[in-house]
Image: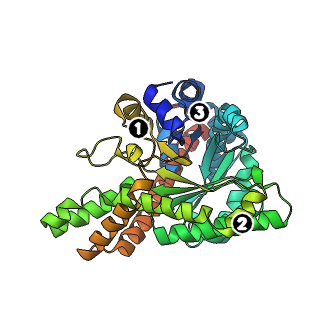
Amino acid sequence: MNQRLAALTEAGVSVWLDDLSRNRIVSGSLARLVEEDGVTGVTTNPSIFAKAIADGGAYDAQLEDLVRRGLGLDDVVRELTATDVRDACDILLPISQATEGIDGRVSIEVDPRNGHDPAAMLEEASALWRLVDRRNLFIKVPATRAGLPVIAALLGDGISVNVTLIFSLERYGAVQSAFLAGMEKAAATGRALGAIASVASFFVSRVDTEVDARLERIGTAGAAALRGRAAIANARLAHRMHEQLLGSSRWATLQSAGASPQRPLWASTSVKDPAYPDTRYVDELIADGVVNTMPEATLRAVADHGTVTADSIRPFYDDAAGVLADLQSIGISYADVVETLEREGLAAFEKSWAGLFEQLKSRLEELRQGGRA
């Protein structure tokens, strides 16, 4: 394994890939990343699948079969994405077995259009769990207010959950409460807690993008000094909340019953501003027991020139709190920033999902008329 990636793993960070496609599976690319680069998990989202299905003809054979079977568009989308996720789960199964289900996970997301409909999310999440039919699956549920009871319900039913689109520390606290409630329900009904896993996906780079734009509008020297500091500070404070939860009596009870912690997962880790080092959202968020999911370009950058330390989070809790306080003092509303990011994040995934549906609708029409692209 690459020396820097090995050091990151040794520091306790699980390295996951934020990408998946049929080409990546059939070419052996994913298997090589697992074997040679220490990748121990995969995350997906609607944007990733939209790009994957647009990129070539790898899906045509399955599409033709689905057309012959007369499936509707919603079912076609789910069959295509579930097939990729199922195959990726199989590739990562040895990792899952070796880590007793902690790693070796692959995520599939509920339809983002249902992000504010708890009943629809719960129904779809349960259906996806059955459709993929792999124990090393994560169902991704957004950390919207409507998503919180869904998280608890799924965990209570023994379904492992990746809670996604977390920006706010306050909302993260609600996610933690949902995790505890779900695991307590699972324990009360006699489920094996060790078989249920969860991660809480904090989106990182988008925080800097939003805050930096507001700082630029303020235009003072004090504002300039705070550029590029909000995202890492936010994630570090989330990690402090994670550690506080691990010190609670509720968690101690669950742990004694065999539960594993809900690990923090750093998502959106590719740098959006070229002025910043391209590995900063990895280098500055290292601690044992966290996950960092990254696109392959970021993974390669870390392998080439990342700076890996034993812990780049815990020593900086006070500094992180100071950053958020300084932002508030110059007129940056943290509450407005995180509400904006959640709204825009959900909208972006809805747009990608809609684009995927339109793309497949056209392709299905071609196939039904006997044409081939």
Residue in the foreground of this view, choosing between 57 and 158: 158
Q: Which type of secondary structure does the marked residue at label 3 adopt?
A: helix
Mark 1 neighbour class, 10 Å CA radius: few under 14, some 14 to 19, many 20 or more: many
- Label 2 sits on what residue type? Gly
**Alpha-carbon span between mark 1 and mark 2:** 35 Å
Q: Is label 1 or label 2 in front?
A: 1
> Label for residue 182?
2
Q: Position of residue 193 (x, y in %)?
A: 77, 55
Dot 2: element = helix
Residue 120 shows up from this direction: no
Question: Who comes first in sequence, dot 1 or dot 2?
Answer: 2
Instruction: Give the image location of residue 3, x and y in percent.
Output: 45, 26
Circle 3 residue: 60
Across and down, in percent, residue 338 comes to 40, 68
Question: What's the mark number on residue 308?
Answer: 1
Q: Does 81 sit left or right of 234 as displayed? A: right
Image: 205 above or below 363: below
Q: Quadrant of residue 65?
A: top right
- Front residue of 322/98: it is 322
Q: Earlier in the sequence, mark 3 or mark 1?
A: 3
Calculate the distance from the C-alpha at mark 3 to the C-alpha at mark 1: 42 Å
Nearer the observer, disc 3 or disc 1?
Answer: 1
| Colour mapping used in the image | rainbow
